[in-house]
Amino acid sequence: MASLKELRARIGSIKSTRKITSAMKMVAAAKLRRAQASAEAARPYAAAMRRMLGELAAAVQGEGGVPRLLSGTGQDKVHLLVPLTSDRGLCGGFNSNVHRLTVQTIRRLQSEGKTVRLLPVGRRALNFFSRDYADLIVDHVSGVSGKEIPFSVASDLGEKINALVETGEIDVCALVFNKFHNAMTQVPTSQQLVPMLMEERGAGDVPADNVAQYEFEPDEATILAMLLPRNLQVQIYAALLETAAGENGARMTAMDNATRNAGRSIDSLTQVYNRTRQTNITNELIEIISGAQAV
């Protein structure tokens, strides 16, 4: 049985840990409000851009000279996966979910005879994939999470991907990230960026025959060549914002659970401390009484 001194030390240590986790929870909650607002504000813009480019792409289908960001290289051999994670831990299974989905995708593609390349974003992704998949990493980005994310990060990343596509080094590119749902739920998602997927029309959409016909100036192909790189950057930026919101939500939830567990541990150890202290007092009284009777 632990001594009273050891129990006091353990209780004091857990109380200090509880103060830290409680403070981290409040910091994450404050950051979450801003990150969530940014992620939700970016969703309509990213969706509208995909929809607009889909309509433009439908107008140039079958024509020559279509940009590779839209049509791809014509092959399906080399896939680039871009897992988005945080730079820091202490956020539950947030990063592990992205790692798991990425590994599953890697194994599936390799079983189909495809070549896989990785471009990890976030220090946690880089550390994880450097252990078992270091030979697949072509580049990496870190030092992004934990602060306001500038659009230049998505712009630089989009330019790297665009360069790999234009030189024919990759055929397909997909993001793997956690889509923010609420503070307790982040959904691991894989989103294909290259070639751009056309959004299917829903049951309530206007039929294709009734869609208004537009004349574009300049022509559709020129507009696509200008907007497709921008769309790539916008989709990456939206995913980065989703990742930032999900990270803060996961960290807030994890720190809240840690604070609660620390409180339960303190209560349990306090009970053990009190019982041990009472036992020691009882033993001392018995020794005193036994000694008095012996005299």
Image (cartoon, helix red, strand yellow):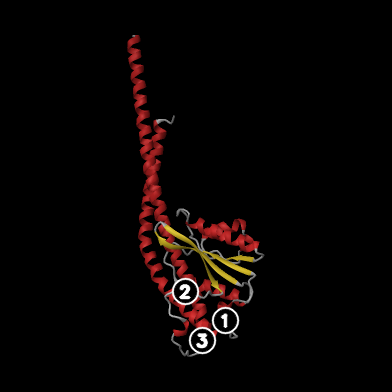
State which quadrant residue 280 falls in: top left
For marks 3 and 1, the one nearer the N-term is: 1
* Residue at 67%, 65% in the rendered image: 113
Q: Is residue 14 above or below residue 126?
A: above
Task: Out of 147 and 193, give the one closest to the viewer.
Answer: 193
> Could you classify mark 2 by the number of other residues whose Cα lies within 10 Å: few (under 14), some (14-19), or many (20 or more)?
many
The residue wearing badge 3 is: 220
Question: Would residue 108 be found to the left or right of residue 95 on screen?
Answer: right
Which of 115/60 is in front? 60
Q: Given the current orientation, which residue lies at the most extreme right position?
A: 113
Q: For the residue carrying disc 1, how many other residues have a C-alpha within 10 Å: few (<14), some (14-19), or many (20+)?
A: some
**Which residue occupies 36% across, 43% down?**
263
Residue 105: x %, y % from top left: 58, 62
Considering only order in the chain, which callout, 2 or 3, is on the residue closer to the N terminus? 3
Q: Residue at x 42, y 71 (%)?
A: 43
Q: Residues within 10 Å of mark 3 (few under 14, many from 20)?
A: some
Q: CA distance from mark 3 to mark 1?
A: 11 Å
**Element marked by disc 3:** helix
Number of numbered markers: 3
Q: Are marks 3 and 2 in contact (CB under 8 Å)?
A: no
Image marks 3 and 1: residues in contact by CB distance under 8 Å:
no
* Residue type for callout 3: Glu
Disc 2: which residue:
234
- Along the line of sight, which residue is nearer the eye, 78 or 24? 78
Can you identify the residue that label 1 sits on? 67
Give amino acid for label 1. Answer: Pro
Give the image quarter of residue 27: bottom left
Secondary structure found at label 1: loop
Q: Is residue 44 above or below residue 87?
A: below
CA–CA distance in space, label 3 to label 2: 20 Å
Is residue 285 found left or right of 79 in the rendered image? left
